Amino acid sequence: MYGSRIDMVRADAAWLARNWWAIALRGVAGIVFGIMALLMPAITLAALILLFGVFAVVEGIFSVLAAVRGHSGAPRWFLLLEGVVGIAAGVVAFVWPGLTAIVLLYVIAAWAIITGVLEIAAAARLHNRIRGEWWLVLGGILSVVAGVWMMRAPGSGALAVVLFGILQVVLAFRLRGGLVEAEQTLSRAA
């Protein structure tokens, strides 16, 4: 059992190193979103609410269609209920954007906190397998701080998102460097 846990940690570390670009992309997206939220808060929020509303309505329609056609493995009543709730959420986003903004803010803040905690846990799990894991810890802490910050002072939370994005990009390139170093070591050994 202990050997399989070590193998899981090795696999996680290898996955992170191979997919460094995904972490970098996530960081760049955080930087862009944070800067947009700082420079154009009203437009960013309006666009986010509009996108959510469109997504909810479209997803709701597809769920209703799946319930009517019965081609899904899920029970029809569940799909129908899911579809109606999705359409209703989309309509609420369009009719009451202020209410949607508040709810969306708390959802994003909760997401940031949960993501941060999971990043800290991943760093703890991988601390012997990757170098520079403290960047992951720092990113996780900053994500938690950003989430709490957004709940307490919504406008200033964007700055924390920018900093989080920067840390993610730095972490990605540290992981990439570790992968290149590991590949060079393997090629020398062969």
Image (cartoon, rainbow, N blue to C red):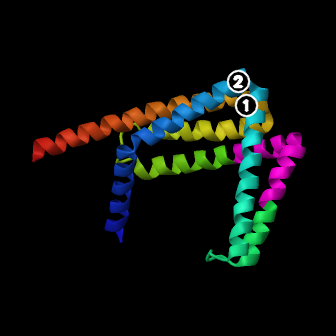
- Magenta segment, prevailing SS (helix, strand or loop): helix
Residue shown at 33% from the left, 55% from the top: 10
Q: Is residue 4 left or right of residue 28?
A: left
Horizontal and vertical percent position of residue 4: 34, 67
60 or 130: which is nearer to us? 60
Give the labeled residue for mark 2. Answer: 38
Foreground mark, 2 or 1, reads 1
The stretch in magenta equals 86-110
The picture places residue 185, in percent across and down from the top left corner, at 18, 41
Against 73, is 178 above or below? above
Whether residue 129 is visible to the viewer of this picture, yes or no, is yes
Residue 113 image position (x, y, % from top left): 65, 45
Q: Quadrant of residue 11?
A: bottom left
Q: CA distance from mark 2 to mark 1?
A: 9 Å
Is 140 rendered above or below residue 55?
above
Q: Residues within 10 Å of mark 1 (few under 14, many from 20)?
A: some
Image quarter for residue 61?
A: bottom right
Label 2 environment density (alpha carbons within 10 Å; few <14, some 14–19, many ≥20): some
Q: Secondary structure beneath disc 2? A: helix
Examine the rendered structure and indicate whether residue 83 appears above or below residue 189: below
- The amino acid on which the numbered mark 1 sits, given as a three-letter code, is Thr
Q: Is residue 99 magenta?
A: yes
For residue 68, side relative to residue 112 (left or right): right
At x 45% / y 42%, what residue is drawn?
22
The residue to which callout 1 is attached is: 44
Three-letter code, disc 2: Leu
Camera-nearest residue between 121 and 180: 180
User: Quick one: label 2 or label 1, which is nearer the N terminus?
Assistant: 2
| Residue 139 placement, left or right of 50 | left
Q: Residue at x 63, y 50 (%)?
A: 114
